[in-house]
Amino acid sequence: MHLLIAGLVLFLGLHALPIFSVAARDRLIAVLGRNGWRAVHSLFSLAGVVLIIVGYGQARLAPVVLYAPPYWMRHVTFLLMLPVFPLIFAAYLPGRIKTKLKHPMLTAVKTWAFAHLLANGMLADVLLFGGFLAWAVAARISLKRRASTLNIEARPSAWNDVIAVVAGLALYVATLLWLHRLLIGMPLISH
């Protein structure tokens, strides 16, 4: 459990820096340079992800039950997960989805985390998904209060929305059928 907590603190703490102090992040960018900051940010983020994965795996070996969701809640989770992958794609493809939501990645993270909290009641699950949910909510509130620093992008295109939805739904189906079992070790659909 300690590795999971350390990974969450490292990953989410690093990503929460602009929530608490844009000036501190800007000072680090000034000292390290934009590419230096990206390199440091990427390395520490990767270290956080590795700690989260290893820590979560270890915590699943000695689970601590906080609540036991009913079995049918899995189906609610499957339904809530349906827009998550299209939203992730939409975050990188200028279109109406991105224009309307402004931050589709944060919407995807909030939906992913909430959906998983509905179906998983172990302490490690609550730490992992609850931590990401809290971060995404705080990040969205913070972004509403800050002046926009978004780069000027290409004009939104309806084709980008089509690509985001089709690619996202394809990834959703692949995750249901194979990827979740392959990457997480937990099959979602029994064959």
Image (cartoon, rainbow, N blue to C red):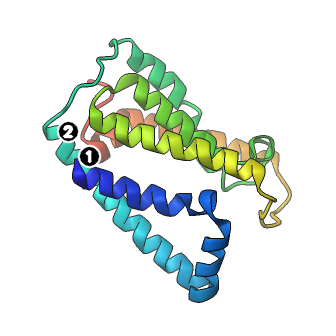
Closer-to-camera residue (139/20):
20
- Residue plotted at (59% across, 88% down): 31
Closer-to-camera residue (140/70):
140
- Say the numbered circle drawn on residue 56: 1
- Residue plotted at (55% across, 76% down): 38
Residue at the extreme right: 155
Side of 175 relative to 1 (left or right): right
Residue 167 visible within the image: no
Residue that carries the numbered disc 2 in the rendered image: 60
Count all numbered tags in the image, as a single digit. 2
Side of 73 relative to 82 (left or right): left
Query: x and y percent of residue 62 in the render?
Result: 13, 37
Q: Amino acid at mark 1?
A: Tyr
Query: x and y percent of residue 89 in the render?
Result: 61, 49
Query: x and y percent of residue 163 in the render?
Result: 67, 46
Whether residues under marks 2 and 1 lie with C-beta atoms below 8 angstroms apart, the answer is yes
Query: x and y percent of residue 24 in the render?
Result: 61, 72
| Image quadrant where residue 121 sits | top left
Measure the alpha-carbon separation of dots 2 and 1: 6 Å
